[in-house]
Amino acid sequence: MLKEMQKDDFIVSKTDLKGRITYVNQIFMKMGEYSEAELLGKPHSLIRHPSMPKAVFKLLWDKISKKEEIFAYVINKTKNGNEYWVYANVTASLDERGNIVGYYSVRRCPNPNALAIIKPLYATMLETEKRSGVDASTKVLTDILTDKGVSYDEFIISIQE
């Protein structure tokens, strides 16, 4: 069953350097159908949906490990096998010396018009990934961006507006 975020909802989570959950808000628990005890200390990948291309997560980790923020569309799975789409913003959490000490993510309701673009793109990327690997899936995305003459960030932000 597809669950949908409310327009004013914000899902918030924090993780440590290894991606283990250190904080979740109430909306995260409600959408994910988990209790706080079931989430804290667990890998954030617990909610990773099998329809999500690994290439998108590779891009995410590449950017946040360089202290760059990223926006991405993500489909998540719930404890009970349901799914929900989010428009995610992920950043590194820094200490007073500028060292990465964890990661912070805020997700909001995705624009339905954006999902009409993202869903077939991710399906193509995932199919390519299964056949030829993550690099080939990444190439599907970069070829589209090149054809459109935009960066990843410009593309993702423009379809959310």
Image: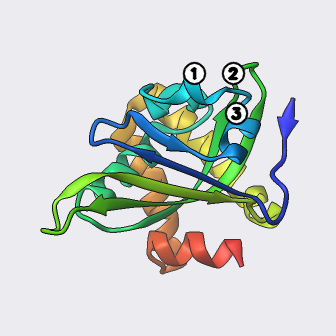
Q: x, y (%) of residue 51?
A: 62, 32
Identify the residue at image location x=44%, y=64%. Answer: 70
Q: Earlier in the sequence, mark 2 or mark 1?
A: 1
Q: Which residue is mark 2?
A: 79
Label 1's element?
Answer: helix
Q: Which residue is mark 3?
A: 32
Give the Cα separation between the discs numbered 2 and 3.
6 Å
Q: x, y (%) of residue 159?
A: 68, 73
Q: Nearer the viewer, mark 2 or mark 1?
A: 1
Q: Earlier in the sequence, mark 2 or mark 3?
A: 3
Q: Which residue is mark 1?
A: 38
Give the Cα separation between the discs numbered 2 and 1.
10 Å
11 relative to 15, above or below: below
Q: Nearer the viewer, mark 1 or mark 3?
A: 1
Q: Residues within 10 Å of mark 2 (few under 14, many from 20)?
A: some
**Residue sitting nearer the eye, 134 or 49:** 49
